[in-house]
Amino acid sequence: MATAFGLRRKKTIAPPPLPLDRIPRHVAVIMDGNGRWARSRSLPRMAGHRAGSENIRPIIQRFADYDVRYLTLYAFSTENWERPNDEVKGLMRLLSRFLKRETSHLHENGIRLVHLGDLSPLKPKLQQEVRDAIELTRNNDKMTLAIAFNYGGRAEIVEAVRKIVAAGVAPEDVTEELVAGYMTTDGLPDPDLVIRTAGEMRISNFLLWQSAYAEFYSLPTYWPDFGTPHIDECLEAYAQRVRRFGGLPEHEAAASQNGANGHHTSAAAAVPHPRPSNGLAPAHPVRHRSDSDVSLGEVSKDRAGASRPSAANGRSA
Ligand code: FPP
């Protein structure tokens, strides 16, 4: 059966209605708790990772039903190399199996696969499998699935700085837009919502640059148990959030501007959306306070800097 989003599956359970402007465009997930899931069943850790990997398809389906256009999954961090060798090898095998099992399904359903991170330490055969899947699905436009594998936010920033220096960019030309264009996420909008399963409240080196203004949601469910009701819970919570991007919601800004006597009490000025690099509108229109009434770290900057470089910056997707 085809859903409203065009994905094929056996049965359809419509997502609860949420206002379209409250649906995050990009959701990123820290899939945590595979080990605890396995331990709670007296199973080896790899059984948890296998169950976690098999959980990915229905999760994509549910987000697609909500018309979430970008989904990023954190599957292997640059720190995960520190795990026992067998587990590292097992996760590599799981990536290969995932690609063999899921690539044609993704392709049939119009989903583009991209990779975030550094493929180079992976075995050449596995690197090729990833590249083949990316190549097969590159023109799909229903949804983008980004698999962060051997990904680390700090490593990504360091790599971007190296490339910027190597390109001989003048200091005055280094802008947020330019830096963003050197990240492996170039071409993807910043995440609106970062979800972490298994109860931890850490960001764990995930999308450090890109999550500057993402909403964060943590829930206790282990990743292999994360399912439709949990996605509904996350998206309903997100829909309630008031996103300020360091500014004020429009109604509060208007109130502070007009004051009790109807006169302007603040030098606040209406400015365009403060995240121009990805072309997204905020969930709620925001109005910036003037520099004199924002706290340190919230001062809005002039972002009209150099344009972002094209995708020819070495990203693998
Ligand atoms: C964290 O759980 C999860 C990971 C380090 C790997 C995530 C991998 C998958 C969901 C499956 C593999 C998927 C692909 C596409 C290769 P944990 O092991 O840290 O759990 P714990 O904190 O309970 O020990």
Image (tube, helix red, strand yellow):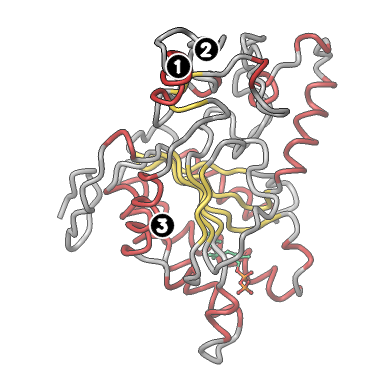
In this rendered view, identify the residue nearer to me: 284 or 117: 284
Residue at numbered disc 3: 102
Along the horizontal axis of the image, is 258 left or right of 302? left
Quadrant of ligand 1: it is bottom right
Q: Which badge, 1 or 2, is on the more N-terminal residue?
A: 1
Residue at 47%, 74% (x, y): give it: 51
Along the horizontal axis of the image, is 175 left or right of 68? right
Residue at 15%, 55% (x, y): give it: 1
Total numbered labels: 3
In this rendered view, identify the residue nearer to me: 23 or 110: 23
Question: Is any part of residue 317 visible from this angle?
Answer: yes
Question: Is any part of residue 72 visible from this angle?
Answer: no
Residue at 66%, 32% (x, y): give it: 183
Disc 3 crowd rating (10 Å Cα; few below 14, some 14-19, many 20+) is some
Q: Which badge, 1 or 3, is on the more N-terminal residue?
A: 3
Separation of marks 1 and 2 at Cα, in angstroms: 6 Å
In this rendered view, identify the residue nearer to me: 281 or 261: 261
Residue at numbered disc 2: 265
Residue at numbered disc 1: 259
Q: For the residues carrying marks 1 and 3, which lies nearer the camera in this image?
A: 1
- In the rendered structure, find residue 241 and report the number of the disc placed on it: none
Disc 2 crowd rating (10 Å Cα; few below 14, some 14-19, many 20+) is few
Residue 136 rendering spot, x and y as whole percentages = 44, 40
Task: Name the residue type under label 2.
Answer: Thr
